[in-house]
Amino acid sequence: MIWFTWRQFRTQTWITIGALAALGVVLVITGLSIADAYAAANLAACQGDCTAAIDTFLSQVWTGASGTVYDLANAIMYVVPAVIGIFWGAPLLARELETGTHRLAWNQSVTRTRWLTAKLAVVGGAAAATAGLLSWAVTSWAGHIDQAAGDRITPGLFGARGIAPIGYALFAFALGVTTGMLIRRTVPAMAVTLAIYSAAVIAMQEWIRAHLLPALHTTGRLDTSSLDTLNTGHAEYRCGQ
Amino acid sequence: MSPPVLQAVGLSKRYGRREALSDCTLAIPSGRVVGLVGPNGAGKTTLLHLAVGLLRPTAGSIEVLGGRPASGAAQLAKVGFVAQDAPTYAGLSIADHLRFGAHTNPGWDQRLADDRITRLGLDRSQKAGKLSGGQRAQLALTLAIAKRPDLLILDEPVASLDPLARREFLQGLMVFIAEHDAGVVLSSHLVSDLERVCDYLIVLVASRVRIAGEVEDLLASHYRLTGARSDLADLPTGVEVIEDSHTDRQSTLIVRSTTPIDGLSFTVEQLTLEDLVLAYMSQTAADPLPTLETTP
């Protein structure tokens, strides 16, 4: 069953590997220029007030190609789970049900439970691996920028770093499989998957995530010396280093 | 006698308020080539899907080769199924389909599969989506028989084929039947497709089994009586009228009788299988149903 799932999934796998490799090349090339800018701004050695060094580094990043790639990479982290849900999840069962091939597959000497398990495990595993690999690449590529800008808590960035994209990819995959199973037709299932995924991502970012943990309130003295630390990004950098 | 290959008791399948199959009680003896005949929408596919476990019964029970359909890998291995329109993976080649069969069936007979594909003159690298209807049906049949099932179930295998492909398909099926000791159940809405292959017949009309039995017994127990209407009014006990038609001067009855009928004032003719099936098919749903008699 695993062989057959792989056989059905082969084209998508090569496309994915190709796309990941192309993105990898872009990240490596721009990554080098980021490293140069980082070294030039002498941020690593920076002690105390680094505002000037950070500004130099970031302005150099934003003006170059890296800035565009940065925005693009952040967008890709949200697009990839959607693509996984639409092209891997939705057709997984819908195409079988639509073309009637489930009647062929379900009458081989493999139980239907094993058939479904193999499909979900292989393609779901590939979804998690793809998102994980991509997120690892982008997170490490953008490490210096994120640290300098200090806004990892920005709603948009949170879902594009670390393990969050794996969660989004698995969610989109499960969503695609479920809508495909219920709608039983590939193209409508793809459309519904995209609609629900987009709604879920926006809702998560805009309204839900902020309430997942109770807000932490702190009261501090406000005077000229602490005024500077209100710029949270720089403050974090300063306190952290 | 070995246990029946398919036994259904009070088997019913309902979709919402529509009854697709109602109160079907059947016992198909082993070693037969069974024809399931009935008009489109009579419930043939429903019955066969219940037999392979693609559907669950709403009421009643069905056992195939002594087990609940699709209850496990062992049960699935015993039953080969070619679904209506012979579904195959359009994007995969014939070789891929054979590897799929080999990977998913422990009893896979690679030589049988190879021989059949070679005999059919099919190109192994050809995508299934590019095959003609007849070739696709043959590929689906190859997959179903190379898993070496004890029972082969075919749902309208020749319905969409041209006469030549139809003949070739049925010939392939007959070769399989002759070479392997497996039971076969195949459905069709045409008796002529089944006539040459089947030795047991089930007539399914409007979601009910009208009659089931050995073709030989069916032919021996049905007659066409023609004569004056008055002469046909009094029939001996044990004679059951399946269909009657009348003109001013003469009546024609199709009857079932377990004992031979002596033509006194009317003529008695044997029926062809087609006439017999048509008589049952033309019964409207409102007609009283003949009591079902299955010859075990």
Image (cartoon, grey):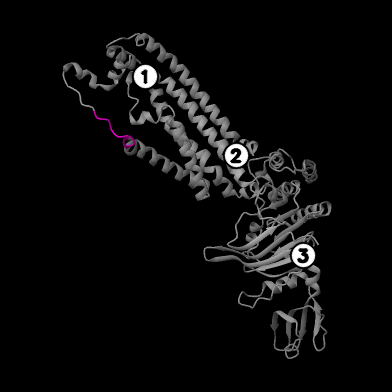
The amino acid at mark 1 is Ile
Q: Chain of mark 3?
A: B
Residue behind mark 2: A118
- The answer to which of A154 and B125 lies nearer the viewer is A154
Mark pair 2, 3: CA separation: 40 Å
- Residue matched to label 1: A145
Q: Is residue B184 above or below residue B295?
A: above
Asked where in the image residue B228 lies, by quadrant, the reply is bottom right
Front residue of B45/B253: it is B45
Q: Is residue A126 above or below residue B127?
A: above
How many C-alpha atoms fall within 10 Å of the one at disc 2: few (<14), some, or many (≥20)?
some
Of circles 2 and 3, which is in front?
2
Seen in the picture, residue A183 relative to B12 is either above or below; the reply is above
Judging by the rendered image, the residue that carries numbered circle 3 is: B200
Q: Main secondary structure of the magenta part?
A: loop
Identity, as a three-letter code, of the amino acid under mark 3: Tyr
At horizontal 71% and vertical 55% (from top left) the residue drawn is: B153
Identify residue type, mark 2: Ala
